[in-house]
């Protein structure tokens, strides 16, 4: 097994100074450890013994190109029978009531404020009501264990689960260590089942945001800051090493532009280390930024030169308003595309680039956009890639765009849902964003609401 890292740029060398060399996969004495000990980033973690006997740590994910794919029937995202097949009539009516409420902008605004206040004041029954309504729609549970029924239910329809720990830390070492341990637990869980194809984390959950920004700005760190940065690097390496050992793909989420370049370089260093055989570590590109296709192309060039595989998750982006506001405050040009159409075009061009270089790139299209999803299925057919090619994935958020997820999975495409989890109080910001996204705009009902209406009418006509 080749565990060499290869040459790195001076900037990457500066970023990774002090990062311990991984002993996880290259130690010839590793088979003498106790069977439930996992060494990651120089730290030994003890995992439950049953994990070791469910799935091989090093079960290979073949990167051999598939044979020419047979013709695939056109996919329709209008098929609500398939989209809501997992929902009973009662569950569908509950969804209808929830999305109907979210279509009322005034109700969402007032309700959001009331929910937050009631939770803060500890009003009896508030948590129960939230957990059995909007939380149940968009989250898997408060803990990994509570997510098990959702994982199993999605798995029955050949949809994977991406457990997304949605708790924001407090910015100290104790919080960063707790986040590391939680992500390690999601990796360990993923090792036990094919129903969890990815784990995911944010770098800002492992080390201070301010230090990422200082590194990107070229500002020298003080000795305590350098030590804190190196502790963050060790946490990052612990996650990537564990993912490599367990053969679990690992998403590194994209964040704000003023420290994203630092995240990119840290992530590429992990790719050099752990993507020698296949794409284990995946970086995320937000295509509402006009420079991201160029960044993707440059990363691909470096992967080819370095002899490692590039894992790529493409999204449109999550921080657009904040990016525009900060750029204005700092007197910088906005990094955001000039229009939604420009973002759509850039996203689709990035899909084409990845499929054209599928020998080196593994791709996940994280999108709720029907046109982009359909385009990727067409690109796969043109490239003779079978729907089940393990190098190409589709992903959507849990509780949304089931017309994409279930129809893609039904047609044999590799599909997964981001399933956030965490204490109700901690995930409230996430839930409120989902409510706002599904609010009626200019008098038009949300896409989700219209699809639920269509399926209810279909079922009524059938009875």
Image (cartoon, rainbow, N blue to C red):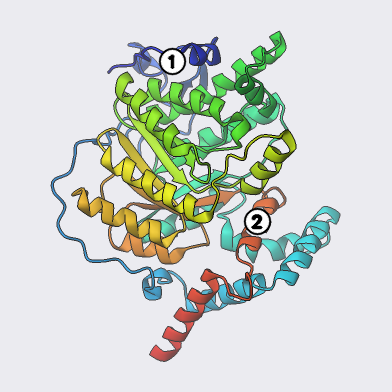
Count of numbered marks = 2
Q: Is residue 409 above or below residue 94?
A: above
Q: Quadrant of the N terminus?
A: top left
The residue beneath circle 1 is 22
Label 2–label 1 contact, CB within 8 A: no
Q: CA distance from mark 2 to mark 1?
A: 39 Å
Return the residue nearer the eye: 421 or 81. 81
287, above or below 298, in the image: below
Q: 177 and 352: which one is in front?
A: 352
Q: Residue at x 64, y 52 (%)?
A: 430
User: In the rendering, at what x and y percent does residue 181 appear?
Assistant: 57, 31
Residue 64 percent location from the top left of the image: 19, 36
Quadrant housing residue 246: top left
**Left or right: 261 with respect to 79?**
right
Instruction: Look at the image and tell me whether residue 194 can be seen.
Output: no
Q: Please tell me which residue is depicted at 48% across the width and 55% down the height of the picture.
A: 341
Residue lying at 68% horizontally and 31% vertically, measured from the top left: 175
- Crowdedness near tag 1: few (<14), some (14–19) or many (≥20) residues, C-alpha within 10 Å: some
- Callout 1: SS: loop
Q: State the mark number for residue 433.
A: 2
Residue 116 place in picture, x, y as percent = 78, 57
Tell me the quadrant of the picture where the C terminus can be found: bottom left
């Amino acid at each position: 097994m080749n565990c060499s890292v290869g040459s790195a740029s001076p900037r990457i060398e500066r970023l990774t100074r002090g990062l311990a060399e991984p002993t996880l996969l290259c130690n010839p004495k590793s088979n003498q450890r106790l069977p439930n000990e996992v060494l990651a980033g120089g730290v030994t973690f003890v995992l439950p013994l049953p994990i070791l006997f469910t799935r091989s740590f090093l079960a290979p994910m073949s990167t051999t190109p598939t044979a020419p794919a047979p013709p695939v029937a056109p996919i329709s995202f209008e098929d609500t029978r398939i989209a809501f097949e997992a929902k009973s009539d009662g569950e569908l009516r509950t969804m209808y009531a929830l999305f109907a409420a979210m279509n009322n902008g005034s109700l969402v605004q007032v309700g959001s404020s009331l929910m937050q206040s009631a939770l803060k004041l500890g009003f009896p029954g508030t948590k129960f009501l939230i957990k059995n309504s909007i939380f149940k729609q968009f989250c898997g549970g408060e803990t990994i264990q509570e997510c098990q029924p959702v994982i199993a239910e999605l798995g029955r329809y050949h949809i994977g689960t991406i457990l997304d720990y949605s708790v924001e830390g407090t910015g100290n070492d104790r919080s960063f260590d707790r986040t590391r341990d939680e992500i390690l637990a999601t990796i360990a869980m993923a090792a036990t089942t094919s129903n969890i194809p990815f784990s995911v984390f944010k770098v800002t959950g492992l080390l201070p945001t301010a230090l990422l920004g200082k590194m990107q700005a070229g500002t020298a760190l003080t000795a305590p800051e350098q030590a804190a940065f190196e502790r963050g690097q060790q946490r990052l390496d612990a996650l990537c090493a564990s993912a490599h050992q367990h053969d679990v793909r690992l998403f590194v989420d994209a964040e704000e532009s003023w420290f994203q370049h630092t995240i990119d370089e840290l992530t590429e260093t992990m790719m050099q280390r752990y993507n020698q055989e296949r794409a284990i570590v995946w970086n995320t590109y937000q295509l509402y930024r006009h420079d991201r296709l160029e960044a993707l192309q440059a990363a691909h060039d470096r992967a080819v030169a370095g002899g490692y595989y590039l894992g790529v998750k493409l999204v449109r982006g999550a921080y657009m308003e904040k990016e525009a506001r900060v750029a204005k405050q700092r007197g910088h040009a906005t990094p955001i595309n000039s229009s939604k159409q420009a973002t759509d075009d850039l996203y689709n061009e990035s899909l084409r680039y990845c499929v054209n270089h599928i020998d080196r790139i593994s791709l996940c299209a994280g999108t709720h956009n029907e046109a982009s999803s359909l385009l990727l299925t067409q690109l796969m057919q043109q490239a003779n890639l079978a729907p089940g090619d393990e190098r190409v994935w589709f992903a959507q958020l849990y509780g949304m765009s089931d017309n994409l997820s279930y129809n893609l999975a039904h047609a044999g495409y590799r599909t997964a849902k981001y399933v956030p989890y965490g204490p109700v109080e901690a995930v409230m910001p996430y839930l409120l964003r989902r409510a706002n996204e599904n609010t009626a705009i200019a008098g038009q009902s949300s896409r989700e609401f219209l699809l639920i209406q269509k399926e209810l009418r279909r079922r009524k006509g059938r009875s």
